[in-house]
Image: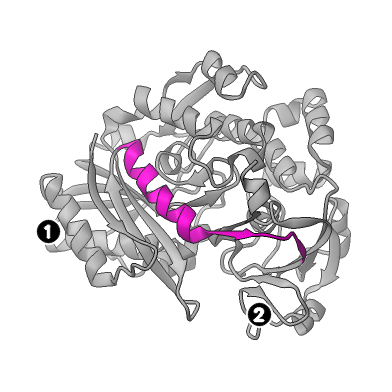
Amino acid sequence: MSTYITQGGRDTVITSEEKRALLHEALLKLGGIPKKILVIPPDITRLHSNAGELTQLLYELWDIANGTTFDILPAIGTHAPMTEPQIAEMYGDLPKATYHVHHWRRGLHHFGEVPSEVVQEVSGGKLDYSIPVAVNRRLVEGNYELIISVGQVIPHEVIGIANGFKNILVGAGGVEMINKSHFLGAVDGMERLMGRTDTSVRRVLNYAHAHYLKQLGIVYVMSVMDADASGERVMRGLYVGDDARTFETAAELSRSVNMTFLDEPLEKVVVYLDPREFKSTWLGNKAIYRTRMAMADDGELIIIAPGLREFGEDAEIDRLIRKYGYCGTPATLNAVSENPELQDNLSAAAHLIHGSTEGRFNVTYATEHLTQAEIESVGYHWAPVDEVLAEYNPATLVDGFNDGGFFYISEPGQGLWALRSRFSE
């Protein structure tokens, strides 16, 4: 197990040429540029991760070396398959690449399981089920010389800090790992996990990697992104390795640049959801997840969501969200205990917990495509998006405090906002 590249710092800006050189250096340390490569990057829902450019650079290095196979398997997890325009926007023009779609319910290679005793231990006795470990069969049966996972290290509501082994075990993983790991994180408590690397879910994934995935020799290319003084996205860190320590090193920098600590709770927060990236509350609720540790009791969260068209990206999950709504942890756990359809879709149950404020603060979604009745039926308030945009124009707002005292966030998926006191608990 090795770390091949560790480059980064709070004030570091890694240019495109430097990214190319670092990736080339990593490949040379691995023995050279293979002819047959599988790259597993995130999808359009991680547009700002820079994984698109990193995939392009890997392709260019492979092409120069006269490679024969460059397969791309976007790590969509439960998300909708990427469209051709999304592929072009995310990865650019890669004429010799072949794209494959991951299906989380089929086409899997099954390894074994994380035993129930492990889950019981990491959850503090809250859960005691086993978790089957499976990934897209292409990883095992594709006969690749090298498998490269590309992604961003960033605070995350399910696992604490995203990427590393999560990109494979969840992004290219099977239904039971996705369902049960998400439910584990929700039951254990988001506020115990977010921004931390030693979490119950991370321990499960580390176990699965050590016992099953390590044999595949996957190399992880991980970015740490930030906004510079002008608001442009820049790469602060690039880390390449095949072990947990490489991820931990990247996570240290992510905590430093992607987390905003506040001394006083936020009474009013306005969040904008880029319509290219956010089309469902399944993703758009990052506006809730990432701000909940900063929100004041009885505070107001306004989510401007012009691209929102659905609740779940998966049809069955969308149906379940519409049926059960965001009603808080006790109601959701009771619904799970009484309804087999939720027991069979624990990631949906987890999401219902994640998306609830537990009655502590208020959420208003400003939408165009989802109606007032639809938004209110799942437990949120609603406002017409045009009216809200007229009052809060993203083109004139700055991230942070604005005139009028409200706090604005332009990219909720790129950070975590928390009271110092809550995070230290």
The image shows residue 219, relative to residue 419, as above or below, that is above
Residue 221 position, x and y percent, is 32, 51
Q: Is residue 253 magenta?
A: yes
Of residues 136 and 30, the one drawn nearer to the viewer in this rendering: 30
Could you tell whether 55 is left or right of 196 in the image?
Answer: left
Compute the Cα span from label 2 to label 1.
Answer: 45 Å
Could you tell whether 264 is left or right of 395 in the image?
Answer: right
The local crowd at label 2, few if under 14, some if 14 to 19, many if 20 or more residues have their Cα within 10 Å, is some
At horizontal 47% and vertical 43% (from top left) the residue drawn is 171
Number of numbered discs on residues: 2
For the C terminus, give its image quadrant. top right
Q: Which residue is mark 2?
A: 394
Kind of residue at disc 1? Asn
Query: What stretch of residues is rendered in magenta?
Result: 243-267
The image shows residue 238, relative to residue 388, as above or below, that is above
Query: Residue 291: in sight, yes or no?
Result: yes
Residue 276 position, x and y percent, is 57, 69
Kind of residue at disc 2? Pro
Of residues 422 and 148, the one drawn nearer to the viewer in this rendering: 422
State how the image is colored.
one colour
Q: Is residue 284 magenta?
A: no
Residue 385 position, x and y percent, is 78, 74
Q: Which residue is mark 1?
A: 66
Query: Residue 109: in sight, yes or no?
Result: no
Could you tell whether 137 is left or right of 133 in the image?
Answer: left
Mark 2 secondary-structure assignment: loop
The local crowd at label 1, few if under 14, some if 14 to 19, many if 20 or more residues have their Cα within 10 Å, is few
The image shows residue 199, relative to residue 110, as above or below, that is below
At horizontal 82% and vertical 60% (from top left) the residue drawn is 299
